[in-house]
Protein backbone atom coordinates (compact mmCIF):
# COMPACT_ATOMS: atom_id res chain seq x y z
CA UNK A 1 0.00 0.00 0.00
CA UNK A 2 2.76 2.48 0.86
CA UNK A 3 4.32 1.83 -2.59
CA UNK A 4 1.03 2.66 -4.28
CA UNK A 5 0.73 5.90 -2.32
CA UNK A 6 4.35 6.75 -3.21
CA UNK A 7 3.74 6.08 -6.91
CA UNK A 8 0.60 8.23 -6.91
CA UNK A 9 2.48 11.04 -5.15
CA UNK A 10 5.34 10.88 -7.68
CA UNK A 11 2.81 10.90 -10.53
CA UNK A 12 1.18 14.02 -9.12
CA UNK A 13 4.54 15.78 -8.82
CA UNK A 14 5.47 14.91 -12.40
CA UNK A 15 2.14 16.16 -13.71
CA UNK A 16 2.66 19.52 -12.01
CA UNK A 17 5.76 20.09 -14.12
CA UNK A 18 4.28 18.95 -17.42
CA UNK A 19 2.81 21.20 -20.05
CA UNK A 20 -0.39 19.80 -21.50
CA UNK A 21 -2.55 21.77 -23.94
CA UNK A 22 -4.84 23.13 -21.23
CA UNK A 23 -2.03 24.22 -18.90
CA UNK A 24 0.05 25.75 -21.69
CA UNK A 25 -2.97 27.60 -23.03
CA UNK A 26 -4.27 28.80 -19.66
CA UNK A 27 -0.90 30.02 -18.47
CA UNK A 28 0.04 31.59 -21.78
CA UNK A 29 3.19 29.48 -21.73
CA UNK A 30 3.46 29.13 -25.49
CA UNK A 31 3.41 32.89 -25.99
CA UNK A 32 6.60 33.14 -23.91
CA UNK A 33 8.49 31.35 -26.69
CA UNK A 34 6.95 33.00 -29.76
CA UNK A 35 8.86 35.63 -31.68
CA UNK A 36 11.91 36.48 -33.71
CA UNK A 37 15.27 36.05 -32.00
CA UNK A 38 18.50 37.64 -33.27
CA UNK A 39 21.77 36.13 -32.17
CA UNK A 40 24.73 33.92 -32.96
CA UNK A 41 24.87 30.34 -34.10
CA UNK A 42 27.91 28.12 -33.84
CA UNK A 43 28.04 24.75 -35.59
CA UNK A 44 30.92 22.42 -34.84
CA UNK A 45 34.25 24.18 -34.90
CA UNK A 46 33.05 26.93 -37.26
CA UNK A 47 33.15 30.61 -36.40
CA UNK A 48 29.99 32.14 -34.89
CA UNK A 49 27.48 33.37 -37.45
CA UNK A 50 24.97 36.16 -36.82
CA UNK A 51 21.52 34.91 -37.74
CA UNK A 52 17.88 34.91 -36.73
CA UNK A 53 15.52 32.24 -35.48
CA UNK A 54 11.75 32.49 -35.50
CA UNK A 55 9.39 30.51 -33.30
CA UNK A 56 5.74 30.34 -34.33
CA UNK A 57 2.65 28.40 -33.26
CA UNK A 58 1.99 24.87 -34.44
CA UNK A 59 -1.54 23.72 -35.28
CA UNK A 60 -1.18 20.57 -33.15
CA UNK A 61 -2.08 22.15 -29.82
CA UNK A 62 -0.94 24.71 -27.28
CA UNK A 63 2.16 22.79 -26.24
CA UNK A 64 3.70 22.68 -29.73
CA UNK A 65 5.91 25.17 -31.56
CA UNK A 66 7.45 25.47 -35.00
CA UNK A 67 11.13 26.48 -34.97
CA UNK A 68 12.37 28.26 -38.09
CA UNK A 69 9.48 27.04 -40.25
CA UNK A 70 10.53 23.38 -40.26
CA UNK A 71 11.26 21.87 -36.84
CA UNK A 72 8.38 20.85 -34.59
CA UNK A 73 9.07 21.34 -30.88
CA UNK A 74 7.14 20.40 -27.77
CA UNK A 75 7.06 22.61 -24.69
CA UNK A 76 8.13 20.61 -21.65
CA UNK A 77 7.65 23.32 -19.01
CA UNK A 78 7.34 27.09 -18.75
CA UNK A 79 10.85 27.77 -20.03
CA UNK A 80 11.98 24.67 -21.97
CA UNK A 81 11.17 22.75 -25.12
CA UNK A 82 12.40 19.65 -26.88
CA UNK A 83 12.75 18.83 -30.57
CA UNK A 84 12.23 15.07 -30.82
CA UNK A 85 14.04 13.20 -33.59
CA UNK A 86 12.44 14.10 -36.90
CA UNK A 87 13.35 13.77 -40.54
CA UNK A 88 13.73 16.94 -42.58
CA UNK A 89 14.41 17.18 -46.27
CA UNK A 90 17.10 19.67 -47.26
CA UNK A 91 17.83 20.02 -50.97
CA UNK A 92 16.58 16.50 -51.66
CA UNK A 93 18.53 14.89 -48.81
CA UNK A 94 16.79 13.43 -45.76
CA UNK A 95 18.43 14.54 -42.51
CA UNK A 96 17.60 13.74 -38.90
CA UNK A 97 17.26 16.65 -36.49
CA UNK A 98 16.77 16.79 -32.73
CA UNK A 99 17.52 19.19 -29.91
CA UNK A 100 16.36 21.19 -26.94
CA UNK A 101 15.96 24.80 -26.01
CA UNK A 102 15.23 27.09 -23.11
CA UNK A 103 14.27 30.69 -22.53
CA UNK A 104 15.07 33.11 -19.76
CA UNK A 105 13.19 36.38 -20.16
CA UNK A 106 13.79 37.45 -23.76
CA UNK A 107 16.86 35.23 -24.22
CA UNK A 108 16.86 31.82 -25.88
CA UNK A 109 19.38 29.02 -26.14
CA UNK A 110 18.80 26.24 -28.66
CA UNK A 111 21.14 23.27 -29.04
CA UNK A 112 20.39 20.87 -31.87
CA UNK A 113 22.03 18.23 -33.98
CA UNK A 114 21.68 17.32 -37.64
CA UNK A 115 22.58 13.80 -38.74
CA UNK A 116 23.39 13.19 -42.41
CA UNK A 117 22.68 9.92 -44.27
CA UNK A 118 26.33 8.86 -43.89
CA UNK A 119 26.03 9.15 -40.08
CA UNK A 120 27.88 12.45 -39.66
CA UNK A 121 26.41 14.48 -36.79
CA UNK A 122 26.71 18.27 -36.76
CA UNK A 123 25.93 19.93 -33.42
CA UNK A 124 24.87 23.58 -33.39
CA UNK A 125 23.99 26.09 -30.72
CA UNK A 126 22.01 29.28 -31.19
CA UNK A 127 21.83 31.98 -28.53
CA UNK A 128 19.71 35.03 -29.15
CA UNK A 129 17.46 37.77 -27.86
CA UNK A 130 13.86 38.60 -28.79
Image (cartoon, rainbow, N blue to C red):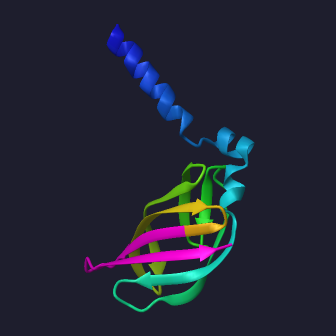
- Number of residue marks: 0
99 relative to 17 in the view: left or right: left
- In this rendering, is residue 124 above or below 103? below
Q: Position of residue 2 (x, y in %)?
A: 34, 10
Residue 103 in sight = yes
Location of residue 39 in the rendering, given as x and y in whole percent from the top left corner: 59, 81
Residue 77 % position (x, y):
56, 47
**Residue drawn at point x = 64 percent, y = 74 percent:** 129
- The magenta stretch spans which residues? 109-130
Question: Does the magenta-highlighted stretch encompass residue 42?
Answer: no
* Residue placed most toward the observer, 108 or 73: 108
Return the x and y of residue 110 as percentages of the image width and height: 50, 69
Check the image and report above or below for 39 versus 29. Answer: below
Question: In this picture, is 57 found above or below 129?
Answer: above
Q: Main secondary structure of the magenta part?
A: strand
Residue 125: quarter of image: bottom left
Q: Is residue 123 magenta?
A: yes
Q: Is residue 68 visible?
A: no
Is 117 situated above or below 17?
Answer: below
At x 60%, y 49%, the residue is 78
- Image-based side of 107 in relation to 112, left or right: right
111 or 122: nearer the viewer? 111
The quadrant of the image that shows the C terminus is bottom right
Residue ranking furthest to the front? 105
Which residue is pictured at 67% across the width and 66% down the height?
A: 106
Residue 18: which quarter of the image? top right
The N terminus - image quarter: top left
Identify the residue shown where x is 61% and y is 68%: 107
Amino acid sequence: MKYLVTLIWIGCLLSLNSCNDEVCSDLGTRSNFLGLYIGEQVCGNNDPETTSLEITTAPDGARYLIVDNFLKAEITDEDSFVISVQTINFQGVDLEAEGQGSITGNNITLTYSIKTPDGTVNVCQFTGTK
